Every structure is written in structure tokens, then in C-alpha cells.
Amino acid sequence: MGVSVAGVVSQPDGVVDVAPSLGLGWRRLALVELMADHLDLDLPVYLGNEADLAAKAEHIRGAGIGVGDLLYVSGEIGGGAILGGRALSSQDGHLGEIGHLPLNPDGKRCLCGSIGCWRTEVAAETLLRRAGLSEAAGPARGRAQGQARGSGEAIKRVIQAAAHGDRRALEAMDAEGRWLGIGLAGLLNILGPRRIILGGFLTRIFPCVIDRLLEEIDRRGLEAARAGLEIVPGALGDDAALLGAAELALEPVLQDPTLVSAAEITPGF
């Protein structure tokens, strides 16, 4: 079983160190052990961070096929990197928490407790606030109560308003593109990916923000890092992280097919 979670995942013990965006108060939660005990399916459980798993899926099956150096950025803001064909990761799971890049010294307080994190400038709730729409479910209430679904409908309204020339919606998209570009330029200069994939709600607003985003990257990115760079929307939509979790669960079997005996395979599967 593969499990995707929006939080800092400690490897290899399967513990969610912290998951502030879920609003559930998780700290040092032994999620792998918890799921194995409660589901009682007699299956090994593999756990990963949702952005890392989405990056894996896009690399194998989506917008990153054939690209050895890529950066995946989700709308939450989470990030996963594939460099030299291999996932960039760390055992304690804190590597790649790009949403908490301190970007705006005069910014708002983040869910993590810090000030001016990148996610406070580009997350869905920020875009909606700038556009004058109330969030369907704020971050403190968590996804379990419909945040993702409600925000998706509201974002659709902002896109439609921008397409019809609504001033506030256009200004919100401009600010989104600006802050996305500033953050991506810094990551570009550090990691040097050849392709940046924008996932989550960023896929949907991609046409509205790409020009402003590229302006900031042209202003701030190193010339050598910008040469040949592609910035593209994700190809796998909201299923990217789940597909990555499936890949995570399949990896051990693909590396050693003898882990599964012929007797265990359901006929006709």
C-alpha cells in the first residue's frame, strides 16, 4: 500500500513529523504503524510526502517523462525534485519544504509559525483573498472538511473573472505570478532544473500567471540556469500524488519480483 500525505515524512520509520496544512495537529504521528494496525490488510505500507510523490509520478508518467532534472511545485506550496534522474530526498523528510522558504520579510504569519514563507504569498487561500473571494475552507479547518473542493470552485470563479477583465481578479493573478516567479527564480539558481512542472491548482491558473512568472525569472534567474528552461503545467492533475504513492508501493516488487509468489497473484489480474 502506498500512502501520500501533505506533511513532513520521516524515512524510513514512516512517521509524519508535522503536517500544518492539514489542520489536524499531527506531530510525530506514526502513520504507517497506525494504518497497518487499523486496516489489518497484512500489507506493507509505504509512506511519502505528496509533492515528492507527485514529482515521481510526473517524471515517470506525466509532464516530466524523459527529463533527468526537474522541479515539481504544487499549489500548497510543496515541492519535489528529480536531479540526475534520482529523487532528491532526506531521511528526516525536511528536504524540499520549499513552501517555507522565507521570502517576504513584511509578509504574513505562516501556519508553521514563521513570517513571510513563500506559501503565504502564493497558496490558494491567498489568491482567493486577493481576488475578494472568501475561502471555502480556510487552512485551519483542513482538507478533511472540504477545503480542496471548495477552493477549487472558488479558483474557477477567479479564472473566469480574470478572463472577463475583472480588475481585482487580474491583480490577484498578477501578484500570484510575481511571487511564483520570485520563488522559482531562487530555486532555479540553486537546483538548476531543466523543467519546472506546476501542479495542483497552479495547473489550472497556469495561462493566467505564466507571463508574469517568466518576467520575474528573466529578471532574477541566472542566465545559464534559464537557458533551455521549460515551465509547464502538470499532466496528471489531482491524481499525481496518488499515482506517485502507487509507484512507491510497486517499487520494491519491480526491483525484486520474487517478493510476490505466483500463488499470491489473483488469477486474471
Image (cartoon, rainbow, N blue to C red):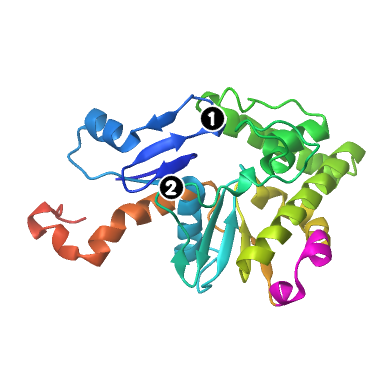
What amino acid is found at the position of numbered circle 1 in the picture? Arg
Q: Can you name the residue that lies furthest to the left here? A: 263
Q: Which residue is mark 2?
A: 242
- Identify which residue, 236 or 181, lies in the foreground: 181
In the figure, 39 relative to 123: above or below?
above
Point 50% across, 34% down: residue: 19
Q: Earlier in the sequence, mark 1 or mark 2?
A: 1
What amino acid is found at the position of numbered circle 2 in the picture? Leu
**Mark 1 residue crowding within 10 angstroms, few (<14) / some (14–19) / many (20+):** some
Quarter of the image containing the C terminus?
bottom left
Q: Which residue is mark 1?
A: 143
In the figure, 88 relative to 53: above or below?
below
Quarter of the image containing the N terminus?
top left
Please indicate, yes or no, whether residue 138 appears anywhere in the rendered image.
yes
Point 67% across, 69% down: residue: 230
In the figure, 208 relative to 67: above or below?
above
First to last magenta residue range: 216-227
- Determine whether the residue tagged by mark 2 lies in a helix, strand or loop: helix
Q: Is residue 192 left or right of residue 86?
A: right
Please tell me the numbered disc located at residue 82: none
Main secondary structure along the magenta-highlighted residues: helix
Please tell me whether residue 222 belongs to the stretch shown in magenta: yes
Q: Is residue 194 left or right of residue 165?
A: left
Q: Position of residue 120 (x, y in %)?
A: 71, 37
Q: Position of residue 27 (x, y in %)?
A: 44, 29
Q: Is residue 176 left or right of residue 84?
A: right
- Determine whether the residue tagged by mark 1 lies in a helix, strand or loop: helix
Point 63% across, 69% down: residue: 192
